[in-house]
Image: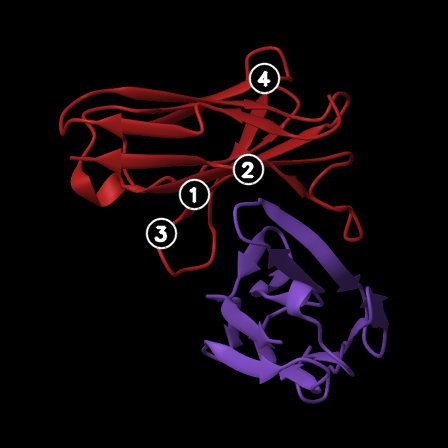
Amino acid sequence: GAGVSQSPRYKVAKRGQDVALRCDPISGHVSLFWYQQALGQGPEFLTYFQNEAQLDKSGLPSDRFFAERPEGSVSTLKIQRTQQEDSAVYLCASSLGGLREVADTQYFGPGTRLTVL
Amino acid sequence: GNSVTQMEGPVTLSEEAFLTINCTYTATGYPSLFWYVQYPGEGLQLLLKATKADDKGSNKGFEATYRKETTSFHLEKGSVQVSDSAVYFCALKDDKIIFGKGTRLHILP
């Protein structure tokens, strides 16, 4: 695949349900990022992986949010006991190098739009 | 903390008009600066970037210059097209990427 892919593209959940969002980064990319984009806002950082290591999870809004990348490739963002305020587009991005490489470009997936009823 | 402020939209222009979208930043270090674009129904795409002061990023007729003295990275285009209609995000990268709120641009034929 040429780019970052995410699935599902759309997810409707009832309040209290658990959801899992998947990200397939560009093959060989070391870094993987998750962002949350509320309606009419810019993306906000959630968490960062370098290979399989989660190096920064400072943006995760609560302990209901959990992300993993067990083999350093595909990543899953899990939200437990969803709330209405979790409704947003969740974006995944990957980059070839590590976070400290200032000129490195992040490539974004199309996002998963989560609606919590 | 680091932050990005960009002009609020929507911005509506006629085709072939000159475009400026203002962006200023606050950062403790020396971040890289970016403009991303989100076309209708598509994901975020990198439009241009600059990694140090006085660098000029350019792509598809768009330009932005990293101005450390005014902490700005304004996006400009000399003659916009209908196909430029999109949402534009200014961003900085220090230890993580921080985005502005986005500016929606409408170009009328």
Q: Which color is chain A depicted in?
A: red
The residue furthest top is: A71
Residue A65 position, x and y percent, is 32, 30
Q: Tag 2 or tag 4, which sits nearer the N-term? A: 4
Category of crowding for the residue at label 3, using alpha-carbon neighbours closer than 10 angstroms: few (below 14), some (14–19), many (at least 20):
some
For mark 1, name the chain: A
Residue type marked 1? Ser
Q: Nearer the viewer, mark 4 or mark 2?
A: 2
Res. B93 visible in picture: no
Q: Tag 1 or tag 3, which sits nearer the N-term? A: 3
Front residue (pair A14, B51) = A14
Residue type marked 2? Pro
Secondary structure of residue under mark 2: loop
Residue A58 position, x and y percent, is 43, 43
Identify the residue shown where x is 58% and y is 44%: B43
Q: Is residue B59 above or below residue B17?
A: above
For mark 4, name the chain: A
> Label 1 belongs to which residue?
A58
Residue B79 position, x and y percent, is 76, 81
Are discs 4 and 2 less than 8 Å apart at CB? no
Tell me, for residue B33, which label it has, or none.
none
Q: CA distance from mark 4 to mark 3?
A: 24 Å
> Label 3 belongs to which residue?
A38
> Label 4 belongs to which residue?
A74
Q: CA distance from mark 2 to mark 1?
A: 23 Å
Q: Tag 1 or tag 4, which sits nearer the N-term? A: 1
* Colouring convention used in this rendered image of the protein: by chain
Identify the residue shown where x is 58% and y is 83%: B13
Q: Tag 2 or tag 3, which sits nearer the N-term? A: 3
Q: Which color is chain B depicted in?
A: purple
Secondary structure of residue under mark 3: loop
